Image: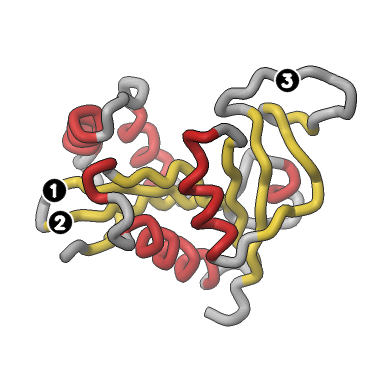
């Protein structure tokens, strides 16, 4: 059994070490410390999935998205959904999204989310569509800029499709 809760002050080092040890890749040094500083300013909410005290995953709710398509319409964005590889397909990602959507519904009518377009994002792509997220109609973006027809873009984490979901039925 697992629980979902908001990260607390003073957990940055533990989160950084837990993520880096269990995910098979690492976050930049200070990643979680920065999130907790932003959380203290109510810019972000960092949600954790835990089995007792063991890290299983996390996601962030960014209350003012850097993506203009969300920011200009006051749509909070869920970012950085991660679940430990050895705990995937057990409902943890969905539980994190449930909590994120409930918190967003307290402040906004819509939730936003984006995903990369290569195979590493396949599970997330399927999950978001199954949960009712649809493209926001603004097309692909590379970084902060709309992709332009006829141009060439590198397929990496910056090539993103953004999706929205109406939360009225929460």
Q: Secondary structure at mark 3?
A: loop
Q: Residues within 10 Å of mark 1 (few under 14, many from 20)?
A: few
Q: Which x, y percent locates residue 14?
A: 17, 36
Q: Which x, y percent locates residue 66?
A: 64, 39
Name the residue that disc number 2 marks. 51
Q: Residues within 10 Å of mark 2 (few under 14, many from 20)?
A: few
Q: Earlier in the sequence, mark 3 or mark 2?
A: 2
For image coordinates 54% across by 65% down, the residue present is 131
Name the residue that disc number 1 marks. 54
Mark closer to the observer (1, 3): 3
For image coordinates 43% across by 41% down, the residue present is 38
Q: Residues within 10 Å of mark 3 (few under 14, many from 20)?
A: few
Is residue 131 left or right of 166 when viewed as pictured?
A: left
Rendering quarter of residue 158? top right
Most foreground residue, 12 or 129: 129
Q: CA distance from mark 1 to mark 3?
A: 39 Å
Q: CA distance from mark 2 to mark 1?
A: 5 Å
Name the residue that disc number 3 marks. 153
């Amino acid at each position: 059994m697992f629980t979902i809760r908001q990260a607390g002050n003073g957990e940055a080092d533990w989160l950084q070490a837990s993520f880096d040890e269990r995910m098979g890749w690492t976050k930049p040094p200070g990643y979680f410390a920065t999130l907790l500083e932003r959380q203290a300013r109510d810019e972000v909410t960092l949600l954790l999935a835990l089995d007792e005290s063991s890290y299983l995953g996390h996601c962030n709710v960014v209350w003012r998205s850097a993506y203009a398509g969300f920011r200009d319409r006051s749509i909070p964005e869920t970012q950085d959904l991660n679940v430990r590889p050895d705990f995937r397909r057990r409902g943890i990602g969905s539980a994190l999204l449930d909590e994120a959507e409930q918190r967003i519904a307290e402040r906004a009518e819509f939730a936003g989310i984006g995903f990369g377009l290569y195979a590493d994002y396949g599970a997330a792509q399927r999950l978001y569509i199954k949960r009712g997220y649809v493209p926001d109609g603004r097309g692909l973006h590379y970084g902060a800029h709309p992709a332009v027809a006829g141009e060439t873009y590198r397929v990496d984490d910056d090539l993103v499709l953004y999706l929205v979901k109406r939360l009225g039925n929460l």
